[in-house]
Amino acid sequence: MKGRKCSLTRQRYLKKANKALHLTHTQGVLNKNEVDGYSEFTKRCFLGKQLKIKALGLKMNRDPFKSVFYKDSIPDWYCPTCGKRLLKLLEDTLLFKETLESRVKRDRREDWYPDEEQYVYTCMFECSNERCKQIVASSGRGGVQEIPHQTREGKVQVEFIDYFEPKVFIPPLKIIDIPYDTPKSVRNELQYSFGLYFVDPGASANHARASLELLLNELKIKRFRIRQHKRIRLSLHERIGLLPIKYDSIKPLFYAIKWLGNAGSHGGSVMSKNDVLNLYEILSELLHSVYDNKQKGSKIWPGRLTNEKDQYLKPNKRL
């Protein structure tokens, strides 16, 4: 009963986030067929009671942040330092071993199958930019994937390939572009969020929400009020309400990030990666609106956000 109550609380948070977005975006409504990529939790929250996900002006390329990788196939992960080139796997650094649980199952079960094998791995990636060559360390879990294919004789053969699911990147990948003028405190908090994205989406969303509080600090929004000679801390909701009139057009974005962050703070196991990517997309829109970098010529982080023709945009030279 307690778990069900907690789940209903999270649903309410996501519904409120969508309601906030509804005040901002009046075009580009996504229908049910267009949200198949979202988790069941998100679809249930956003599509229930005629609440619909509102499409933002930009669309994230989410595939690299939901993918596993193979020895000979790496997702489009851009270097977190220069942002200009993709990371490449240093194959001689890839080490993986079968877990104890996997070994026990294999030894005890007669019906054990190779695709049940589970690994832990560690490896290094290198930026393909000759002027950068940043090294990125990664670790996580892996397994064996069964891939059937047909021979020339028409027979079906099964091939087993090792796959790897990252949980940690050091330094963390940049999932969205952070405008150059973004204050250091907000930037650092987002880096913490990116670092937790693969291993704990809920905690990642919570840090993204914390970056919103820091952003309000930088915008000189007061944090306390005086009541009966006592200093009382204002809630995030109250502080958003104190934003100057010039931010009225994007104030719903503040509220949406707040509600999505609240959902993450009430249990990371419920929020999926897609839920957090929803938050990041809104946050990217907000930061660019506040710091007006779109008009200053900054570009979207390559591989993350794409234009209407799904063409990668040039990276920002100032990182």
Image (spheres, grey):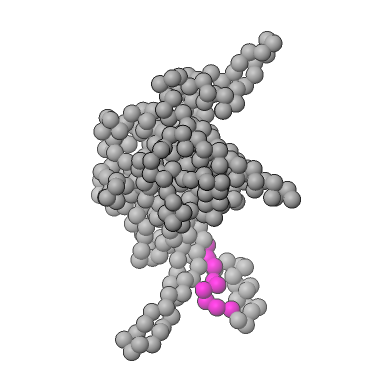
- The answer to whether residue 235 is left or right of residue 179 is right
Work out which residue is located at the far front of the displayed protein and give it. 50
**Residue 186 horizontal/vertical position (percent):** 45, 31
Which quadrant of the view contains residue 316? top left
Answer whether residue 206 is visible to the viewer in this image: no
> For residue 256: magenta?
no
Picture quadrant of residue 75: bottom left
How many circles with numbers are drawn on the protein?
Answer: 0
As displayed, is residue 231 above or below residue 206?
above
Task: Provide residue 88's location: percent of width, then percent of height.
Answer: 33, 57
What residue do we see at 41% from left, 45% from top?
29
Q: Is residue 277 above or below residue 19?
A: below
Q: Is residue 194 left or right of residue 237?
A: left
Q: Residue at coordinates 46% horizontally, 62% vertically from top-left?
A: 164
Picture quadrant of residue 69: bottom left
Task: Indicate the position of residue 252 as horizontal and vertical percent values.
Answer: 47, 32
Magenta residue check for 117: yes
Q: Measured along the vertical axis of the image, is residue 318 above or below residue 171? A: above
Give 163 or 148, whichever is nearer the viewer: 148
- Visible in this render: residue 107? yes
Q: Nearer the viewer, residue 280 or 53?
A: 53
The quarter of the rendered structure image containing the C terminus is top left
Q: Residue at x 35, y 87 (%)?
A: 154
Residue furthest bottom as drawn: 153
Q: Position of residue 203 (x, y in %)?
A: 56, 43
Q: Which residues are magenta?
A: 112-120
Q: Residue furthest top?
A: 229
Residue drawn at (52%, 44%) of the image: 51
